Amino acid sequence: MIKIQAEANVPTEHGTFRMIAFSENENDWMPHMAIIAENTDFSQPVNVRFHSECITGEVFHSKKCECGQQLDAAMKYIHENGGIIIYLRQEGRNIGIINKLKAYSLQEKGLDTVEANLQLGLPADDRNFGVAIEILNLLNVKDVNLLTNNPEKVKHVVESNIHLNSRIPLQIPANDISRGYLKTKKDYFGHLLDDNDN
């Protein structure tokens, strides 16, 4: 069972957020995080984003994906409207950065993101969104507006004890490099993306 290990207010370029670290043990260097806007009203449906770690996109601003831009957009949105980002330490759809770079190498040879994972003997997507539900329960969140394009995240909320009030799209326009990646997201994973932007 995960629990709160530490929390503090952290000022960022998007505003100040309450950051809470969740893990089973206090010595975990890679805890999941809840990033909570100061103006969040827990008596109303809470704006929530489940966001999986992506060091290449968030730290190094890779153009292969839109993860960093989505995180920035989500932080801006919840700062302005209240809400929570559940930051999940599930790098590369939970295959880890080493395997992610191996998959990138295969993509350089013409495979798409799913084909590369499968050729490595890995799942197309091994993320666990159940832990996000667990964190929302620990925060006593009962009703959410989910910022996502991913139907799998919607499904996890719908099948949980938390009420899904609405889905808020969080679409980032494609660039010349990310266009194929986003097409795979739509075609293989069923992401709810507008063709005009991809």
Image (cartoon, rainbow, N blue to C red):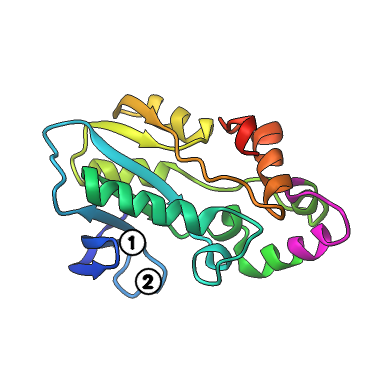
SS assignment at label 1: strand
Q: Residues within 10 Å of mark 1 (few under 14, many from 20)?
A: many
Q: Quadrant of residue 188?
A: top right
Question: Is the C-beta separation of discs 1 and 2 under 8 Å?
Answer: yes
Query: Could you tell whether 70 is left or right of 141 in the image?
Result: right
Q: Does 9 sit above or below residue 95?
A: below
Q: Which mark is residue 197?
A: none
Query: Could you tell whether 182 is left or right of 45 in the image?
Result: right
Q: CA distance from mark 1 to mark 2?
A: 7 Å
Q: Nearer the viewer, residue 151 or 30?
A: 151
Q: Which mark is residue 28?
A: 2
Residue at 28% across, 32% down: 144
User: Which badge, 1 or 2, comes first in the chain's sequence?
Assistant: 1
Q: Which residues are magenta?
A: 103-114
Residue at 33% across, 61% down: 24
In magenta stretch: residue 106: yes
Residue at 39% across, 74% down: 29
Residue 46, x across and y down, in percent: 23, 37
Amino acid type of the residue tagged 1 in the rendering: Ser
Q: Residues within 10 Å of mark 2 (few under 14, many from 20)?
A: few
Q: Badge 1 is on which residue?
A: 23
Residue 61 appears in the picture as rendered: yes
